[in-house]
Image (cartoon, rainbow, N blue to C red):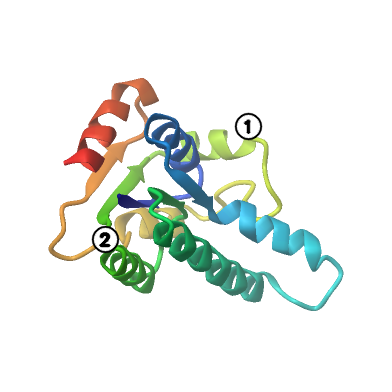
Amino acid sequence: MFFVQMSGFPGSGKSTLSRQIAKRTGAVVIDHDIVKSALLHSIKGTPLDGKIAGNISYNIDWSLIDFNLSQGHHVIFDSPCLYEEMVDRGIDLAKKYNAKYKYVECYLNDINEVNYRLKNRERMISQIREVSSEEAFVHTIENSKKPIDLHCLIVDTSRPLVSYIDEVINYINE
């Protein structure tokens, strides 16, 4: 059993890669944007803001991850993974269920390509439309939160998916 924690800037290819991994392995994908978007649709017109909705949706995500790991399923968490606490929580859950912990970062250091992808995808309510600050973009991709003392896989997602999917599957299986 494995738990894959995805990481990367919005539009870097996390969801596309997560779905391909799931197709090849039978893993369950917990997509943070689906959970957060459902919550935002449910609370439309209420004073609950996006930050609170984000916190609540992460609690739901982690509950779903915990449940699926407890049932013996491979799990992929499709989320930007911007906080150290997320990495720690992922490692702890993997240990709790004796699952292999894997960390895959989708790396795309091209703001123009990221904006192209963001503008041309079917966008959920929780997803950004475009990158408005190059400074914030650079800061985020240069300061991703990775596990300490664990082998992580960083994938250049400017390349076609077919050129790196086997590398990702091999990393998960090692």
Element at label 2: loop
The residue at the point 43 percent across, 57 percent down is 71
Q: How far apart are marks 2 and 1 (CA)?
A: 29 Å
Residue hosting label 2: 146
Q: What type is the residue that disc 1 sits on?
A: Asn
View extreme (right): residue: 45
Q: Earlier in the sequence, mark 2 or mark 1?
A: 1
Position of 26 compared to 43: left or right?
left
The relative height of residue 14 versus residue 98 in the rendered view (above or below) is above
Residue hosting label 1: 120
Q: Where does the image place residue 165, in percent across and percent down from the top left?
A: 32, 28
Q: What type is the residue that disc 2 sits on?
A: Lys
The relative height of residue 3 versus residue 171 in the rendered view (above or below) is below
Q: Where does the image place residue 153, in percent across and percent down from the top left?
A: 23, 45
View extreme (left): residue: 149
Q: Where does the image place residue 40, in percent across and percent down from the top left?
A: 73, 63
The relative height of residue 142 versus residue 60 in the rendered view (above or below) is above
